[in-house]
């Protein structure tokens, strides 16, 4: 969430009852996904019910943290003052091995290395004492 009193501060996750387990896991450097027990599959984003069966039997499970880039963009335009020092920066969508897609950034590689299908794995960035963001970095094939 953007801080209106500090426009050069980057937005931080907005914690809700539905997404709290995800962000708390990130602080422990673990990637967790909400799973519907009857459907036996994860979904994203977190919500009060499963988007496939509308049931409420949701449990959080540890995810592999591995996936592949399914979409990416390199931002060159100065849309937000907080991100000006990072220009040009990337934003990617990663399809995890579990099948859900998360949005994030790729770190540890130049923007010129980005491509659809690039294998990546999650890394954790402790951006404040209370907030840790998942990001992605290239990994070996397989
Ligand atoms: Zn379900």
Image (cartoon, rainbow, N blue to C red):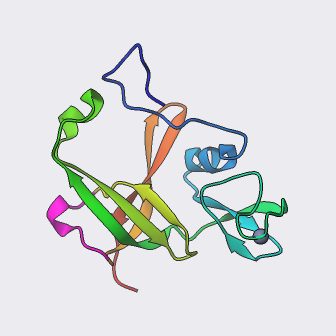
x%, y% of residue 107?
29, 56
Q: Give the range drawn in magenta.
A: 108-116
Quadrant in the picture for residue 68? bottom left
Q: Quadrant of ligand 1?
A: bottom right
Q: Residue at x 34, y 60 (%)?
A: 92
Q: Which residue is drawn at 35% across and 84% down?
A: 141
Quadrant in the picture for residue 69? bottom left
Res. 114 in view: yes
x%, y% of residue 104?
40, 54
Q: Does the magenta stretch include residue 42?
A: no
Q: Which residue is drawn at 57% across and 44% down?
A: 27
x%, y% of residue 109?
22, 61
Q: Is the magenta stretch mostly helix, strand or loop?
A: loop
Vertical position of residue 120 compared to residue 22: above or below: below
Q: Which residue is drawn at 58% across and 56% down?
A: 30
Quadrant in the picture for residue 86? top left
User: Which is nearer the eye, 136 or 95?
Assistant: 95
Vertical position of residue 65 compared to residue 125: above or below: below
User: Which is nearer the eye, 9 or 78?
Assistant: 78
Position of 41 compared to 75: left or right?
Answer: right
The C terminus: image quadrant: bottom left
Vertical position of residue 5 compared to residue 68: above or below: above
x%, y% of residue 71?
34, 67
Position of 22 compared to 121: left or right?
Answer: right
């Amino acid at each position: 969430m953007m801080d209106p009193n500090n426009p050069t501060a980057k937005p931080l996750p907005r914690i809700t009852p539905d997404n709290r387990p995800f962000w708390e896991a990130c602080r422990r450097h673990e990637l967790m996904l909400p799973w519907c027990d009857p459907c036996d599959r994860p979904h994203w984003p977190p919500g009060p019910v499963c988007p496939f069966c509308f049931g409420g039997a949701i449990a959080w499970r540890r995810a592999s943290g591995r996936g592949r880039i399914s979409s990416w963009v390199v931002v060159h335009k100065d849309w937000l003052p907080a991100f000006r020092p990072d220009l040009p920066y990337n934003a990617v969508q990663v399809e995890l091995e579990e099948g859900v897609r998360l949005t994030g950034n790729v770190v540890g590689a130049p923007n010129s290395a980005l491509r659809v299908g690039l294998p990546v794995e999650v890394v954790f960035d402790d951006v404040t004492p209370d907030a840790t963001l998942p990001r992605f970095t290239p990994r070996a094939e397989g």
